[in-house]
Image (tube, rainbow, N blue to C red):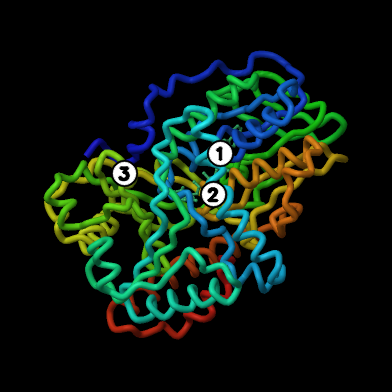
Amino acid sequence: MTGYGAIYWLDDCGDDLTRRPALAGDTTVDVAILGGGFSGLWTAWFLLRANPDLQVAVIEREFCGYGASGRNGGWCSPRYPMLVDELEKHFGTEAACATIRAQHAIIDDIGAIIAEEGIDAHFTPGGMLSVARTARQWAALKATYDGYARLGLADDTRLLTADESRALIDVTGVLGGMKTDSGASIHPARLVRGLARAVERRGGRIYESTAVTGVRPGQPAMLETAGGVVTARRAVVLAGEAYLSGLSAYHRQLLPMSSMIVATAPLDAATWDAIGWQGYESLSSGAYTKDYLTRTRDGRILFGSRGAPYLFGSAMPEAALADAALYGPLIDNLRRWFPVLHDVPITHAWGGYLGVPRDGMPSVHFDPDSGIGNAFGYTGRGVATTALAGRALAGLIAGVRAYVPDLPMLHAPGPKWEVEPLRWIGVRYIQNAFARIDAADFRNGSVPVDARLAKTLAPI
Ligand SMILES: Cc1cc2nc3c(=O)[nH]c(=O)nc-3n(C[C@H](O)[C@H](O)[C@H](O)COP(=O)(O)OP(=O)(O)OC[C@H]3O[C@@H](n4cnc5c(N)ncnc54)[C@H](O)[C@@H]3O)c2cc1C
């Protein structure tokens, strides 16, 4: 084991993460972006592609890819942050369909852009495989398929029998599966690091080790940092996702939730023969605690799941993600999925923070009066959606209408989270209830009496 907290993707990103210089003195640009993750960098990239003369600066507290963008499961997924039936309920059938189609289309766009920019992000269009390992999960999977089919969105999706599913990937206890052809796996750290270099090649400036300590709306809007004030003639963009909860003005806008991943050592050919998985599908089950798995190019399996308990006051210490006790259940679970991995070493175990909006809907918005724009709230499904958001936000700021599909994500930030201790009580209750629902489901297919309440309270 390299260590708890060791992030496989960053270890393998192809550069040594040497930090770019920090901001040293006041500066003025057209667009100042807080955050060097996918949201901030895609926004910068689309702005600079539309207008190479624009002066764009990205201000990053640590280094590009430090946040969720450099640590995620590597699913460039056609699944939107809000479920399709929720989209339909809140925004209507047309908007729901337009959103899902845009989400599918952006995956191809990402593949094309990284090819154009020469970013070797291991983009592998293997689609998605969801497996059902309990009767409840199988019923839910069929309902999901029916939902897509009813809206005419299931052309690339089909239900699989248990045998068909196992023929793709030999997971234990599978009752059936759903295969979606759209979707790719990617190396997220190579993507985010390569995107940062692409932004610089197009003339963007990136300051690392520079924490934004305050945001001043106005004409012009500004970002305050210890190294100086960044004045933005046209827009300030907030792209800090979960970490924005650390700025007092945005403290209750997004709830930081953690998700955790363990990585095996590269598997030998005999083990891969036993498992299958020749198609590099992004693999998941229907557990409430969200199991997600990825096959890497160098032959590892990554197993991710919802992470540590929510901490009072939306605290998000990095140390909480290096607690060895949190990873034991993930490793045990991985070995239940694939008993053949019994003796295979686990080399990396890490977590990251993702941002959950109170209404479950990402927000992409630009207010010309305050000069403030934002792109955040992906609830753990941001690898593809950040590109959609960055393109839309660049369009709003630059006035490029063609960039802006008329999607429900284009709205001002939604309602704030409850004040503490209500937030802590509610979120801890939901986390606990979801774990109990999964445990009861696996034990004997039963459902805790409060399952409906927990599902109603959860924003996603
Ligand atoms: C463990 C894990 C697994 C995931 N798996 C998947 C997956 O497989 N597929 C998927 O679609 N999504 C997944 N996600 C979610 C996805 O990674 C995120 O939605 C996406 O990366 C968000 O990108 P972002 O740029 O908005 O935020 P981030 O990548 O978090 O970037 C925000 C950046 O802002 C910087 N920042 C914050 N505050 C400040 C400040 N005050 N001053 C300066 N800089 C600041 C941070 O340092 C950070 O670098 C996962 C997330 C996690 C944590």
Tell me which corner region of the image, top left, top right, bottom left or bottom right, holds residue 43. Answer: top right
- Residue 147 coordinates in the image, percent (x, y): 55, 75
In this rendering, the answer to whether 341 lies above or below 348 is below
Q: Quadrant of residue 188?
A: top left
Taking the image as shown, residue 451 lies to the left or right of residue 93, namely: left
Q: Residue at (51%, 56%) from the top-left corner?
A: 78
Q: Residue at x 18, y 45 (%)?
A: 267
Q: Please, what secondary structure does the residue beneath circle 1 have?
A: helix
- 266 over 439 or under it: above or below: above
Respond yes or no on whether mark 1 lies under 8 Å from ligand 1: yes
Upstream in the sequence, badge 1 or badge 3? 1
Instruction: Kindly indicate whether the residue at mark 1 contacts the one at mark 2 (C-beta within 8 angstroms).
Output: yes
- The residues bearing labels 2 and 1 have C-alpha atoms spaced at a distance of 8 Å
Residue 350: percent from the left, percent from the top?
A: 35, 44
- Is ligand 1 within 8 Å of the beta carbon of the residue shown at mark 2? yes
Which residue does the numbered mark 1 point to in the structure image? 38
Residue type, mark 1 in image: Phe
> In front of the other: label 1 or label 3?
3
User: 98 or 31: which is nearer to us?
Assistant: 98
Q: Which of pointers 3 and 2 indicates the residue nearer the eye?
A: 3
Compared with residue 18, is residue 299 higher up or lower down, i.e. above or below? Answer: below
Residue identifier under label 2:
382
Residue 357's place in the image compared with 368, above or below, is: below
The x, y position of residue 412, in whole percent, is 76, 52
Q: In which quadrant of the rendered image does the N terminus lie? A: top left
- Marks 1 and 3, how far apart at CA: 20 Å
Marks 3/2: CA–CA distance: 19 Å
